[in-house]
Amino acid sequence: MTFQSGEEEWVFMSKVASGDEAAIAELYDAFGALVFKSARQVLTRRAEAEDAVQDIFVQLWKTADRFDFRRARLVTWVMLLTRRHLIDKLRRKSSRPETLGFEPENASFKQLNERSNEVTKPMVASEGNSAIHAKIAELPELQREVIERAYLKGFTLREVSEQLNVPLGTVKSALSRGLTRLRDRIGGSAEELA
């Protein structure tokens, strides 16, 4: 796809905005590989990059009527939207901590890794699960609250910050200190629990 002028790009994006399937397919053919390459450089997992590409092209389609050839060429506009989307994705990802990797022998901690907005679900009864809950209960209040809300209830650290009316930095520190204490008390390595 080669355009001789910005006006041609604008006409093309008008077709995309109107839902012209051929134009949308042409947009993907022209920029899909470039957007995927950018996503793959930023995101660690291929599936995550593929999802991001899909989200980016949906966003391109929904915002196609905002394209202004007087401000930027089409490739620049596409890459700007791509960059913004990937930055937002990284921010959301960094505010949502990685799930705990508890996998000691004879214990199932699957529920610790599942995110749920419900009240903490009862976990499968096992000595290991009871021990984890007991150790979490022994933590200072803020550390316990942050770990329970972030890991057991599935809230982002930003959401926990708002719920507890505590600065985000304090929430992150409480999470880090709490996980360190859990590692020490459970006797697991950093790799097992982080």
Image (cartoon, rainbow, N blue to C red):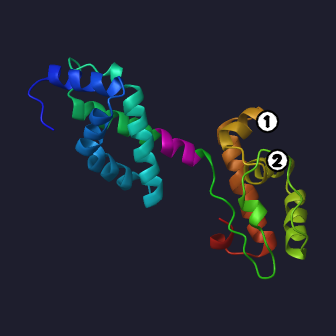
In the displayed structure, does residue 65 sit left or right of residue 136?
Answer: left
What label sits on residue 164 in the rendered view? 1
Main secondary structure type of the part rendered in magenta = helix
160 in the magenta segment = no
Name of the residue lying farthest toward the bottom = 105
What label sits on residue 145 in the rendered view? 2
| Residue sitting nearer the eye, 174 or 125 | 125
Name of the residue lying farthest toward the front = 21
| Residue 99, percent from left and from top | 66, 59
Identify the residue at image location x=85%, y=56%. Answer: 139
Q: How many numbered discs sit on the rendered protein? A: 2
For the residues marked 1 and 2, what is the alpha-carbon distance in whole angstroms?
Answer: 9 Å
| Residue 4, percent from left and from top | 8, 28
Identify the residue at image location x=69%, y=35%. Answer: 167
User: In this picture, is 9 found above or below 136?
Assistant: above
In the displayed structure, does residue 14 sit left or right of residue 173?
Answer: left
In the displayed structure, does residue 142 sit left or right of residue 3?
Answer: right
Hey, which quadrant is residue 59 in on the image? top left
> Which image quarter holds the N terminus?
top left
Mark 1 or mark 2: which comes first in sequence? 2
| Residue 32, percent from left and from top | 30, 46
For disc 2, the neighbor class at 10 Å (few under 14, some 14 to 19, many from 20) is many
**Mark 1: amino acid:** Leu
**Mark 2: amino acid:** Glu
Give the SS element for disc 2: helix
User: In this picture, is 71 found above or below 147?
Assistant: above
Name of the residue lying farthest toward the left = 4
Give the SS element for disc 1: helix
- Magenta residues, start to end: 88-94
Q: Are marks 1 and 2 in contact (CB under 8 Å)?
A: yes
